[in-house]
Amino acid sequence: AEVREGQLIGPEIVQETTKKISQIKDMLKAACDRQNSYADRRRKPLEFSVGDHVLLKVSPWKGVVRFGKKGKLAPRHRYVISSLMDRSYWLSE
């Protein structure tokens, strides 16, 4: 079997593939960082005051029930009771 110049053999193909994978990861990271910076420019920090009506978003994947058992589609509206620190709040149950 003839080996052409364009073909890579054994360890060379592994090294070349590893190098390409590294380049792809770097380019994906750069693209992700760039998109995050675009989104972060438009994002504004939310500030609440005592008595504000807020919607609590609890991820169902965590498996933690913090505010009693409710129906799956039941609204999770809460009121801000007090402000603790920078954007940390006590909420009603």
Image (spheres, grey):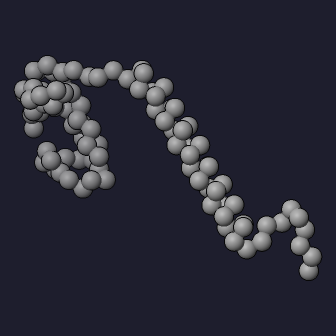
Residue 88 in the figure: left or right of residue 40: left
Say above or below: 39 vs 72. Answer: above
Tell me if I can see residue 79 in this picture: no
Residue 44, percent across and down?
33, 20
The residue shown at (54%, 38%) is 30
Q: State the image coordinates of residue 2 (x, y, percent, origin top left).
A: 92, 76
Residue at horizontal 72 percent and vertical 66 percent from the top: 13
Residue 59 visible in the picture: yes
Relative depth, front residue between 15 and 57: 15
Residue under the point 46% across and 32% down:
36
* Quadrant in the picture for residue 50: top left
Which quarter of the rendering shows the N terminus?
bottom right
Residue 41 in the image: state x and y as whole percent: 42, 21
Q: In the visual, does 19 lie left or right of 5?
A: left
**Quadrant where the C terminus lies?**
top left
Residue drawn 49% across the image and 36% down it:
33
Check the image and name the residue furthest to the right: 2
Q: In the image, 89: left or right of 23?
A: left
Q: Residue furthest bottom?
A: 1
